Image: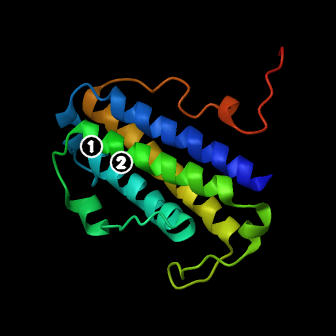
Amino acid sequence: MLTASLAAIYARDLAALRAELEAYPADGDLWRTVPGIANAGGTLALHLSGNLQHFIGAVLGDTGYVRNRDREFSARDLPRAELLQDADAAAAAVAGTLARLTDSDLAKEYPLTVATVRLNTGDFLTHLAVHFAYHLGQLDYHRRTVTGAGPVAGALSPMRLASAVKTDG
C-alpha cells in the first residue's frame, strides 16, 4: 500500500516539475537569477532529476544511471528540452523501480549510507519525496519571481494521489 502511495506522489510531483518547466515563457528565464535566490530554475530541475535517477533509479532500480552532482549545480544555459528529457527519464526510473518494490522492501535497510546514517528504504523514499517537494516549491517561486507569472494550476492536486476518491462535496 505504501509503495502505491509513494508512486502516486512521485508521479504527481514529477508531472508538476514538467508543468513548471513548460510554464517558463523562454528558455533563458530558467537560468536567470535574482538577488537572494542562489539557484536558478534550471539548476533546481537538474538537481531534482539527478537526485531521483540516482537514489531511486540507479540504487534501487539498477538503471545504470551515473550521477554527476557537480554538473547539476554548475551547468548553465541548457535548453528546456534537455531539462524536460531529464525529468522524463527520472519519472520513468521512479515509476519502473517503485512498481517492482513491495511494502516489505520498504522495511529493509536502504543500500547506501545517507549523510552518515543508515535508514530503512521506506523512510528514505519518504525523505526523497519531501526533498523533491521542497525544491519544487523553490522552482515555482523562482519561475514566478523571474517571470511575474502566477502558479501552475493544480500542480499539487490531491486528486492525483493513490487513495483519492471524488466526492460530491
Q: How is the image coloured?
A: rainbow
Residue at the far right in the pictured view: 168
- Residue 40 % position (x, y): 26, 47
- Residue 164 % position (x, y): 77, 32
Task: Work out which quarter of the rendered image holds the C terminus and state it.
Answer: top right
The residue shown at (46%, 26%) is 152
Residue at the far bottom in the pictured view: 116
**Badge number at residue 103:** none
**Three-letter code, disc 1:** Glu
- Count up the numbered dots: 2
Q: Is residue 100 left or right of residue 117?
A: right
The residue shown at (62%, 67%) is 124
* Dot 1 alpha-carbon crowd within 10 angstroms: few under 14, some 14 to 19, many 20 or more: few
Q: CA distance from mark 2 to mark 1?
A: 6 Å
Asked if the residues shown at circle 2 and circle 1 are in contact, with their CB atoms under 8 angstroms apart, the answer is yes
The vertical placement of 87 against 122, above or below, is above
Q: Is residue 85 left or right of residue 158?
A: left
Query: What residue would you read off at disc 2?
Result: 86
Residue at the far top in the pictured view: 168
Q: Is residue 138 visible?
A: no
Q: Is residue 57 left or right of residue 100?
A: left
Query: What residue would you read off at disc 1?
Result: 82
Q: Is residue 167 visible?
A: yes
The vertical placement of 152 against 46, above or below, is above
Displayed quadrant of residue 112: bottom right
The residue shown at (59%, 79%) is 111
